[in-house]
């Protein structure tokens, strides 16, 4: 079993689908605030916010997961997560709850629907008759992508 997930996950919704990420990766949950846009960045990077003196890149998971429908800024939230030694803000439609899961109940041999890249899917877990897609947040972005984003942001702040 993949030991990189604790037994608690934060469950959130994108496009009426439930996703879960390891609660230990989650720093905090913020009401949506429009980020400052950064020029020449991928469409999933919405911009940056200043969170108590820390510049955080805000990433739209809906766009990253290639859903067509744009986010609704009126009722989405930003989940601040730690990836490596940096914090990132992930825009999701809503956060539903924190669940305790039994790692034995994770189905790993699954056929994920088209669109979501299977490299960052750890498996499925069922809770209250609902399927939750477990996301390995460290694998949603390749490290060089994150480096490129951080460099683009740093260059635009300096210039």
Image (tube, rainbow, N blue to C red):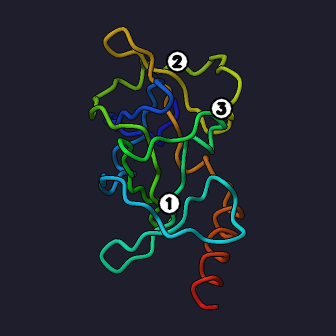
Q: Which numbered marker is on residue 58?
A: 1
At a point 42% along the width and 34% down the height, the residue shown is: 20
Rounded to the nearest angstrom, the CA distance separating label 1 from label 3 is 19 Å
Q: Which numbered marker is on residue 107?
A: 2
Q: Is residue 128 left or right of residue 93?
A: left
How crowded is the residue under tag 2: few (<14 C-alpha within 10 Å), some, or many (20+)? some
Q: Which residue is mark 3?
A: 116
Residue 37: image x %, image y %?
56, 68
Viewer-nearest of discs 1 and 2 = 1
Q: Are marks 2 and 3 in contact (CB under 8 Å)?
A: no
Rounded to the nearest angstrom, the CA distance separating label 1 from label 2 is 30 Å
Q: Is residue 157 left or right of residue 14?
A: right
Viewer-nearest of discs 1 and 3 = 1
* Tag 2 secondary structure: loop
How crowded is the residue under tag 1: few (<14 C-alpha within 10 Å), some, or many (20+)? many
How crowded is the residue under tag 3: few (<14 C-alpha within 10 Å), some, or many (20+)? some
At a point 67% along the width and 71% down the height, the residue shown is: 39
Residue 43 position by quadrant: bottom right
């Amino acid at each position: 079993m993949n030991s990189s997930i604790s037994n608690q996950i934060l469950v959130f919704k994108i496009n009426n689908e439930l996703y879960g990420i390891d609660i230990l990766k989650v720093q905090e949950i913020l009401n949506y605030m429009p980020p400052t846009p950064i020029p020449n960045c991928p469409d999933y990077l919405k911009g940056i916010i200043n969170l108590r003196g820390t510049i955080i890149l805000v990433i739209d998971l809906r766009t990253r997961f290639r859903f067509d429908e744009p986010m609704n800024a009126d009722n989405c939230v930003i989940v601040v997560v730690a990836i490596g030694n940096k914090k990132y803000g992930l825009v999701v439609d809503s956060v539903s709850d924190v669940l305790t899961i039994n790692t034995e109940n994770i189905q790993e041999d699954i056929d994920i629907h088209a669109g979501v890249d299977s490299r960052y899917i750890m498996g499925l877990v069922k809770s209250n008759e609902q399927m939750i897609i477990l996301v390995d947040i460290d694998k949603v972005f390749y490290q060089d992508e994150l480096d490129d984003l951080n460099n683009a942001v740093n260059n635009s702040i300096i210039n």
